[in-house]
């Protein structure tokens, strides 16, 4: 399965933006890997899945948020099956990433996970399982119901930054309503192109505002929102994965929202997936 959004994004920029701004905007694009439901036609190679039961090494305990309960298994991705050379982040060449999130099943929604609540960070976790690890399928802990299993296929895609991302401001400086990037026709056309519902790497597709800023605010200990360090810190965080609400899997994050995991480059290089940070948004 392939995506033609690279040509569409480039064509849109060059058709609707002044030439110099178009090239600078294009320079901010990042490669990502889109994930979508396998349609049963055999098109595309299955690289992971939403829901079902996770396969974990014997010594790896099912993630738990102490005092609240077990996290739900959201998705797993086989890194060795992803399109080779399709990302600009330093993911391992093989092994599996498993994503867990405290979705409220265990306590009827009493506790929630937010980037600006340090005490809630144990409510979302990324587990890296090396390719040579002996694994076994784990049963769902009491109090949880597994999400329906949805096999995922992958494709390489080009992603554009959110227009209010600190990266855009770093490139273009202060912008007013007359700036070409904020032209209503351009913004509407960019929105109409659409993006993948689930993704590895690339730019995040936020439901509301830039997720990097949310994570940066939490990572800095939640200073006032006008603290200039927040934008600088936001530039240090890379989207690792996002998983949208999905009817086939029975996943609904708030009102049609998405889950996001981000990580700093140095932690990714050190394979410290335990240092990834989480946020979520809904409409």
Image (spheres, rainbow, N blue to C red):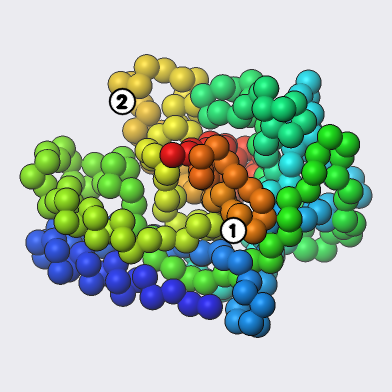
Residues under numbered marks 2 and 1 in contact, where contact means CB atoms less than 8 Å apart: no
Q: Which residue is mark 1?
A: 91
The image quadrant that residue 35 belongs to is bottom right
The image quadrant that residue 266 belongs to is top right
Q: Which residue is mark 2?
A: 228
Query: Residue placed at 66% from the left, 23% from the top?
Result: 111
Query: Residue placed at 74% from the left, 47% from the top?
Result: 73
In the rendered image, residue 59, in percent from the top left (x then y), is placed at 89, 45
Direction from residue 194 to residue 244 in the image, left or right: right
Direction from residue 184 to residue 234 in the image, left or right: right
Crowding near the residue tagged with mark 2, few <14, some 14–19, many ≥20 C-alpha atoms within 10 Å:
few
In the rendered view, tell whether residue 270 sits above or below residue 116. Answer: below
Could you say which is closer to the camera, residue 4 or residue 29?
A: 4
Could you say which is closer to the camera, residue 77 or residue 244?
A: 244
Residue 57 visible in the picture: no
Residue 55 visible in the picture: yes
Query: Residue placed at 39% from the left, 66% from the top?
Result: 158
In the rendered view, tell whether residue 283 sits above or below residue 130. Answer: above
Direction from residue 3 to residue 10 in the image, left or right: left
Q: Which secondary structure lies at badge 1?
A: loop
Could you say which is closer to the camera, residue 247 or residue 236?
A: 247
In the rendered image, residue 25, in percent from the top left (x then y), is placed at 23, 58
Q: Quote the CA–CA distance across marks 2 and 1.
A: 30 Å
Query: Residue placed at 13% from the left, 61% from the top?
Result: 17
Earlier-in-chain disc, 2 versus 1:
1
In the rendered image, residue 187, in percent from the top left (x then y), is placed at 23, 53
Direction from residue 71 to residue 245 in the image, left or right: left
Could you say which is closer to the camera, residue 168 or residue 183?
A: 183
């Amino acid at each position: 399965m392939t995506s033609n959004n690279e040509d569409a994004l480039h064509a849109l920029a060059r058709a609707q933006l002044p030439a110099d701004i178009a090239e600078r905007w294009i320079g901010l694009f990042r490669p990502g890997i889109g994930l979508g439901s396998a349609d049963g036609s055999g098109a595309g190679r299955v690289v992971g899945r939403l829901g079902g039961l996770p396969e974990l090494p014997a010594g790896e305990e099912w993630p738990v948020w102490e005092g609240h309960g077990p996290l739900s298994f959201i998705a797993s991705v086989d890194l060795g099956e992803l399109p080779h050379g399709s990302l600009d982040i330093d993911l391992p060449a093989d092994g599996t990433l498993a994503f867990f999130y405290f979705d409220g099943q265990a306590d009827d929604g009493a506790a929630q996970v937010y980037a600006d609540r340090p005490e809630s960070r144990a409510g979302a976790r990324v587990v890296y399982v090396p390719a040579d690890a002996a694994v076994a399928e784990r049963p769902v802990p009491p109090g949880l119901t597994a999400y329906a299993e949805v096999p995922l296929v992958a494709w390489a895609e080009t992603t554009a930054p959110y227009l209010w991302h600190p990266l855009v401001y770093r490139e273009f400086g202060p912008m007013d309503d007359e700036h070409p990037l904020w032209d209503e026709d351009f913004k509407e056309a960019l929105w109409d192109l659409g993006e993948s519902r689930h993704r590895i790497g690339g730019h995040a597709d936020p439901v509301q505002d830039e997720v990097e800023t949310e994570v940066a605010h939490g990572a800095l200990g939640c200073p006032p929102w006008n603290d200039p360090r927040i934008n600088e810190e936001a530039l240090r965080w890379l989207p690792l994965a996002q998983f949208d609400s999905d009817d086939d899997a029975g996943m609904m994050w708030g009102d049609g929202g998405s889950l996001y995991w981000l990580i700093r480059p140095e932690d990714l290089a050190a394979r410290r997936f335990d240092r990834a940070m989480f946020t979520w948004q809904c409409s």
